[in-house]
Image (cartoon, helix red, strand yellow):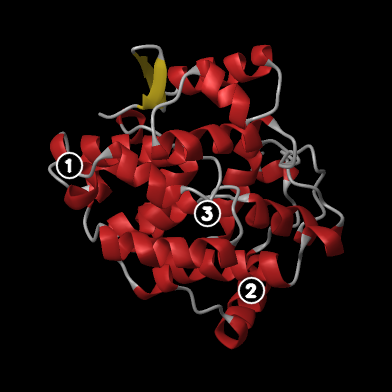
Amino acid sequence: MTSSTLPSLSPKKIHRFQTKILDFYRQHKRELPWRKTTDPYKILLSEIMLQQTQVPRVIPYYTQWIQQWPSIHDLAQAPRKEVLATWMGLGYNSRAVRFHQAAETISTTFKGDVLQAMEHYAEVPGVGPYTSKAVQIFAANKDVVTVDTNIRRIFIHEFDLPESISDNDLWKLAEHCLPKGKSREWHNALMDYGSQVLTSQKTKIPPKTKQSTFEGSDRQIRAQILRLLLREPLSLKQLLEKIPVSQQRIQLIIEKLEREELLNQIDRKYTIKEK
């Protein structure tokens, strides 16, 4: 997207847009535990937990996690089985393993400096461009932008853009609209406006990716397998006795869990993989 294709992006229009979003936020902002800290580790934790998970579900898990592992070094030294057990119920359990691996990398390679690690996010497991920018924004108020599904929906609606707009164009538009020196407040405001006012139900703008149904899905079976193996190692036969699905299906799921380094096999029994 170039300036010539955005004739409506006058300074006056951008200022009106900024004022509307920030005024809403100052009156209706949500009180969330990760907004009460600038600790990059805690911000990173919240961003990982909030991936594909609603805020109300995340809050108790976030609170418990911080009590259990208050620093990146504490988490890096924790047993993987314990990390996974604490995560269970939050969904997409591979996030827990990747976050644990990320903590190990940040603790050793980056000496616990989360912000420095975010500037080299390609070296950190489970961290991509969105998350790396979000941590820099909310922890350091850095003048960079990031675009999640809420922010994408706001820009499409407010600037009458096609839903097919590219990520690259959206990020360029986001950079045009960023009020310098207010990155933390601005992004919190956008997220609240998108979740409370310009919802997907109201705008009819769907997210780019749709979450699959959990009931009866491979995700549900994965969770069942992990819950069982957190209690004790089990053979394939024992798993099939407890989870009534076909052997072929459960084997495919187990193979994927092994590739993701969530479990391994010892003496013909599956167990949660440690570091």
Q: Earlier in the sequence, mark 2 or mark 3?
A: 2
Q: Between label 2 and label 3, give the one nearer the viewer.
A: 3
- Indicate the amino acid at tag 2: Ile
Dividing the picture into quarters, in which one does residue 169 lie? top right
Look at 80% across and 43% down and name the residue there: 163
Q: Which residue is mark 1?
A: 107
Front residue of this view, candidates 96 and 29 = 96
Q: Which residue is mark 2?
A: 21
**From where the camera sits, is residue 127 visible?**
no
Look at 52% across and 15% down and name the residue there: 255
Cα–Cα span, label 1 and label 3: 22 Å
Q: Earlier in the sequence, mark 1 or mark 3?
A: 3
Q: What numbered label is drawn on residue 50?
A: 3
From this view, report whether residue 247 is shown above or below residue 13.
above
Front residue of this view, candidates 89 and 247 = 247
Are circles 1 and 2 on residues that touch, CB within 8 Å? Answer: no
Front residue of this view, candidates 230 and 114 = 230
Look at 56% across and 80% down and name the residue there: 29
Q: Earlier in the sequence, mark 1 or mark 2?
A: 2
Left or right? Give the position of 6 relative to 78.
right
Look at 39% across and 67% down and name the residue there: 63
Dividing the picture into quarters, in which one does residue 260 lie? top left
